[in-house]
Amino acid sequence: MKINHIVETQQFTQPLLMELFDRANLMKKIVARGGTKDYENKIMTSLFYQQSTRTRFSFESAMYRLGGKVITTEQAAFFSSEITGEHLEDTIQIIANYCDVIVLRHLEAGGAKRAASVSPVPIINAGDGAGGQHPTQGLLDLYTIFSELHTLNGLNVAFVGSLDNGRTARSLAYLLSKFSRIKLYFVAPKEMQIKPDILEHLDENNIIYTLSDSLEGIIDQIDVLYQTRFEVERFPNVNFDYSKLKTDTSVLQKMKYDSIIMHPMPRDIEISHSVDSDKRAAYFRQAKNGLYVRMALLSMLFDGN
Ligand code: CP
């Protein structure tokens, strides 16, 4: 199946995911030997309307490691012509004249889809709005789970934090639903629980899930603990005990010895720094995998999949 744009994780079939992971493994070897010049004629635009550390730097590094070039603007929301009222669709059609791929982080859920509808070059959704998707994060997350646990079937995965706005959790939930004997636990204050569209999708795919507001009672069953930010600031008047969602050394003691802890980052109070030295803390390895998976995605798009 050929992919022209990367907008949402539903686009990826199991065979395409395995092809992507093989390519990411190859990219890991290419990086170890100093990169390649295979894509030296390619130019990537990184167009970020919101702040980013991992996604932007790893995409830009990925492009340089592939031998290509990067054009960019600091904080597109302030430095591009959008501030003068230019529509996203116009901006994309202009920038597409100057590059071979556009990596877009937009303020609106659906922004990447709008861009893809007019773009003659591939659009890669680097996160769109609150409650949209972040497909390349979902793909690197899935690659991390596969690399660490050597399977994607029969896993119990807990998503924790502000899940309604959680574009990374949403993207990964769609991907996990493609595998068998998966059980998902959504752990969040009720104001921030995962949205019904994801639950409908899981129902359609016969994926078992539970909703709760505490890790208590489930933590010893979990293979993957996927923490996300709490966004406490969104509900200043809600008196919720966030300690029920945090990962600290007392939680580590209850977790399976062969489980992993992930976080798309940036982290705040969700994971105590005392957890970092535990071998189950996979979040820095996860961020590193972002480079390999994004190199793999760029090369797939340039090669016509
Ligand atoms: N995981 C993630 O999207 O991080 P950034 O916001 O730093 O890109």
Image (cartoon, rainbow, N blue to C red):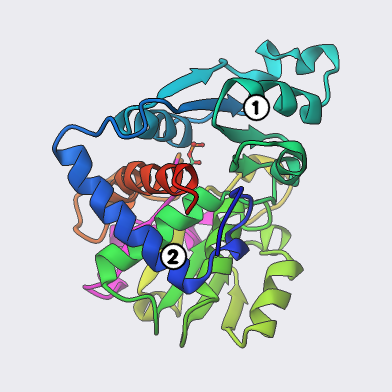
Element type at mark 2:
helix
Question: With respect to residue 256, does 266 lie above or below?
Answer: above
How many other residues sit within 10 Å of disc 1, few (<14), some (14-19) or many (≥20)? many
Residue 173 at x, y = what percent? Answer: 56, 67
Q: Dot 2, crowdedness within 10 Å: few (<14), some or many (≥20)?
A: some
* Structural distance between the alpha carbons of marks 1 and 2: 27 Å
Q: Is residue 36 magenta?
A: no
Tell me which segment is drawn in magenta.
Answer: 241-265
**What residue type is disc 1 on?**
Ala
With respect to residue 173, does 116 lie above or below?
A: above
What SS does tag 1 mark? helix
Residue named by callout 1? 96
Q: Which mark is residue 68?
A: none
Q: Amino acid at mark 2?
A: Leu
Q: Where, by quadrant of the figure, is residue 148 drawn? A: bottom left
Q: Residue furthest right?
A: 85
Residue occupying image coordinates x 38% and y 63%: 19
**Is 148 left, or right, of 135 in this rendering?**
left
Name the residue carrying label 2.
17
Confirm whether residue 276 shows in the render: no
**Residue 144 sits in quarter:** bottom left
